[in-house]
Amino acid sequence: EDKVVQSPLSLVVHEGDTVTLNCSYEVTNFRSLLWYKQEKKAPTFLFMLTSSGIEKKSGRLSSILDKKELFSILNITATQTGDSAVYLCVRGSARQLTFGSGTQLTVLP
Amino acid sequence: DTEVTQTPKHLVMGMTNKKSLKCEQHMGHRAMYWYKQKAKKPPELMFVYSYEKLSINESVPSRFSPECPNSSLLNLHLHALQPEDSALYLCASSQDEEFTDTQYFGPGTRLTVL
């Protein structure tokens, strides 16, 4: 089955905590693994991962892909209330994006 | 310009109304997409246009009618919608259909059907 599975479905932390969001995917037609952040509007692009074991970083956010075990993680360090959002993991292939159900992250002050 | 714009931002319509959603990009992208997103769910693909031709129709009811007048514009015509069609409608574009994984999303139109 063509699935992207994210865990946890929701997470509540306090400012300053570090969080790890998980994503596992089916290998069929895999070309890339994408992470998006969605607040109340459109998803905003965070990372595209195509190679295994190479960490991508953007400020307090980082992500890595394991193509052997078919998963990716998104880490957020020193969380802030502005990090509260749904984080979508998306498998990219030619002509198709397959979305996970998202992780709802709430960061409390 | 790496922006996809959508109008209107919000739309409230009755079940007998006819309205249109508009999407525009000036990045020279040749693939454009319509997604529907219900609350607390991921986006669901509705239509894909590739080089102004309809490439994918994900079994969407005929009350949704897409149109691609030129390579920069994508419309979604709405007629006789149901309350369950209330959702966030997202437009996206990519270089072409082979580069689906580098889509740029517009801000969305939040549609409420009364």
Image (cartoon, coloured by chain):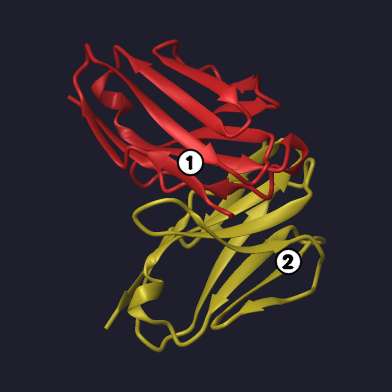
Tell me: residue B20, above or below residue A81.
above
Where disc 2 sits, the SS reads strand
Who is closer to the viewer here, B51 or A33? Answer: B51
Mark whose residue sits in front, 2 or 1: 1
Chain represented in red: B
Q: Residue at the spot x=58%, y=34% of the render?
A: B72
Q: Which residue is mark 1?
A: B43
Q: Residue at the spot x=68%, y=42% of the render?
A: B28
Q: What label does residue B4 carry, if any?
A: none
Chain for disc number 1: B
Task: Estimate the x, y position of residue A53 in percent, counting from the top left.
Answer: 80, 73
Tell me: residue A87, above or below residue B28.
below
The picture quadrant where one finds residue A33 is bottom right
Classify residue B81 as left or right of residue A105: left
Q: CA distance from mark 2 to mark 1?
A: 23 Å
Amino acid type indicated by mark 1: Pro
Q: Give the colour in which the image draws chain A.
A: yellow
Who is closer to the viewer here, B76 or A60? Answer: B76
Classify residue B57 as left or right of residue A81: right
Task: Estimate the x, y position of residue B112 in percent, counting from the top left.
Answer: 24, 32
Task: Estimate the x, y position of residue B105 in percent, counting from the top left.
Answer: 52, 47
Q: Residue at the spot x=76%, y=66% of the render?
A: A66
Q: Which residue is mark 2?
A: A65
Q: Quadrant of the N terminus of chain B?
A: bottom right
Tell me: residue B1, above or below residue B32.
below
- Residue A90, visible in the rendered structure: yes
Chain for disc number 2: A
Q: Quadrant of the C terminus of chain B?
A: top left
Amino acid type indicated by mark 2: Leu
Q: Residues within 10 Å of mark 2 (few under 14, many from 20)?
A: many
